[in-house]
């Protein structure tokens, strides 16, 4: 019996440490529809495309790479981010005061915008870092984020793939 439990403990540890079976995967690899009618595609390979208007995929969009952090990893990352004025204590206090949100719901999403296409031209001269923090709620279908550079809310609903 001990060997059985030891075997499963090793499998679980390997899953989380080697294959990336982490809570960050609850956000990565999905398409998110913005409350402003934009569309954010977070690819599994760590790249993204953010269309201002999903009807026009040829212009007015950002591309680049991204990182996602969950729970304590998000708190640590955001408290160490140079652009951030969020301390670990502030974040923990905020999470503690919210009745329906817990540490497992807390996320940081960092977009590294490498291209901003306008009229067929990349208007960025260097990569822009765009950090967000907030919560993944409603059974992992709704991202409620704060843009750390503008202090504005941004919300996204997970797109449900069409049945094949």
Image (cartoon, rainbow, N blue to C red):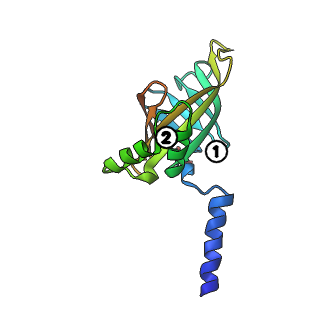
Q: Is residue 7 left or right of residue 149?
A: right
Q: Residue furthest bottom?
A: 1
Labelled disc at residue 159: 2
Identified at 37% across, 46% down, the residue is 93
Identified at 56% across, 26% down, the residue is 51
Identified at 47% across, 38% down, the residue is 133
Q: Position of residue 83 (x, y in %)?
A: 53, 30
The N terminus: image quadrant: bottom right
State whether residue 134 is above or below residue 126. below
Q: Are marks 2 and 1 in contact (CB under 8 Å)?
A: no
State whether residue 29 is above or below residue 114. below
Circle 1: element type? loop
Q: Is residue 122 left or right of residue 98?
A: right
Q: Position of residue 44 (x, y in %)?
A: 64, 44
Judging depth in this view, the residue of 26 and 145 nearest the camera is: 145
**Crowd rating for badge 2 (residues with CA inside 10 Å; few <14, some 14–19, many 20+):** some
According to the image, label 1 marks what residue?
44
Q: Position of residue 69 (x, y in %)?
A: 55, 46
* Residue 111 in which image quadrant: top right
Q: Residue furthest top?
A: 119
The answer to whether residue 98 is visible is no
State the separation of the CA atoms marked 2 and 1: 15 Å
Judging depth in this view, the residue of 156 and 135 nearest the camera is: 135
């Amino acid at each position: 019996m001990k060997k059985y439990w030891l075997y499963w403990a090793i499998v679980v540890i390997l899953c989380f440490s080697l294959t990336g079976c982490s809570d960050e995967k609850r956000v990565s690899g999905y398409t998110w529809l913005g409350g402003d009618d934009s569309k954010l595609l977070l690819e599994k390979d760590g790249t993204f495309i953010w269309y201002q208007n999903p009807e026009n995929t040829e212009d007015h969009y950002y591309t680049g790479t991204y990182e996602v952090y969950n729970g304590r990893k998000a708190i640590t990352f955001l408290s160490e981010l140079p652009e951030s004025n969020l301390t670990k204590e502030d974040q923990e206090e905020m999470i503690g005061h919210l009745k329906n949100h817990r540490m497992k719901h807390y996320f940081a999403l960092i977009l590294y915008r490498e291209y901003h296409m306008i009229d067929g031209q990349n208007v960025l001269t260097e990569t822009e870092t765009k950090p967000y923090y907030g919560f993944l709620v409603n059974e992992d279908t709704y991202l409620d984020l704060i843009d750390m550079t503008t202090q504005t809310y941004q919300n996204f609903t997970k797109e449900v793939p069409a049945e094949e």
